[in-house]
Structures are given as structure tokens and as C-alpha cells.
Image: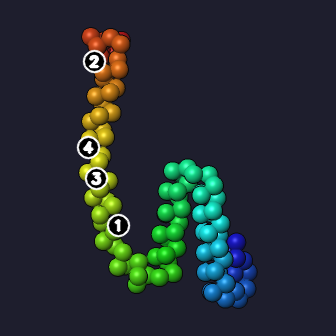
Amino acid sequence: MLWAIQHYTGAGIDTRILSGSRWIALIAFCAYAWARRSLTTWIMVGILVGAEFGHDFPAQAKQLQVLSGIFLRLIKTIIAPLMFSTLVVGIAGHSNLSRLGAWA
């Protein structure tokens, strides 16, 4: 909200205030995620904290690029077995296997 005020009205808001308010909002969102204990909420926290860290500290974020490479390799490793097991369970769960490939 502070960014929108600064951007659209031309008000001179100090960048430290903008950065501090973003981090305070992220801490509040982390507290909400801690209380909620939902995986989806924690994924969103990770995305937002990573984006803010990369925006405020680009040099340090560049050094963490190794972690993102490892994460992406792990995701690629799990996709093939996950798709295969989903197909096997879907086919095995059919009640009439003789009609599995039939249209009607």
C-alpha cells in the first residue's frame, strides 16, 4: 500500500520505511502460517520471503542459487514416479478393466 501511495501520488517515502513495512508484513504472514499449519500457506511464505530476500539482498541471494538448483533437480526427479504411480492407481481403480480403453 505504501508503494502504491509513493508510486501514484509521487510522495517521497523513504526506501527504508518501504522495506521495513514489507518485512513486517512477511513476519505477520509467517505468524499466520505458524498458527494455521497449512502446507499451502507455508509454500506461499517461502515464495514471498524468497522474493523479498532477492529484492533486498541480491548479492546474498545470488549465492543461494545453488539451493534453487538442487530444489529444481529434486522436483524433476519426483515428477516421473509420481505420474507413473498416479496412472497405475487410476487404471487399477477401474471397476471394469475390459472397458478401460473403450469410448462408450
Residue 80, disc: 4
Query: Crowdedness of circle 4 by 10 Å Cα count: few (<14), some, many (20+)?
Result: few
Which quadrant is home to the N terminus? bottom right
- In percent of width and height, residue 75 lies at 32, 53
Mark in front: 2 vs 3: 3
- Which of marks 3 and 1 precedes in the sequence? 1
Q: Residue at x 59, y 58 (%)?
A: 34
Q: Name the mark on residue 99.
A: none
Q: Which residue is mark 1?
A: 68
Verify CB contact (< 8 Å) between mark 4 and mark 3: no
| C-alpha gap between disc 2 and disc 3 | 29 Å
Q: Quadrant of residue 45?
A: bottom right
Q: Could you say which disc has been placed on residue 76 in the image?
A: 3
Drawn side of residue 7 relative to residue 49, left or right: right
SS at mark 4 in the image: helix
- Give the CA separation, mark 1 to mark 2: 41 Å
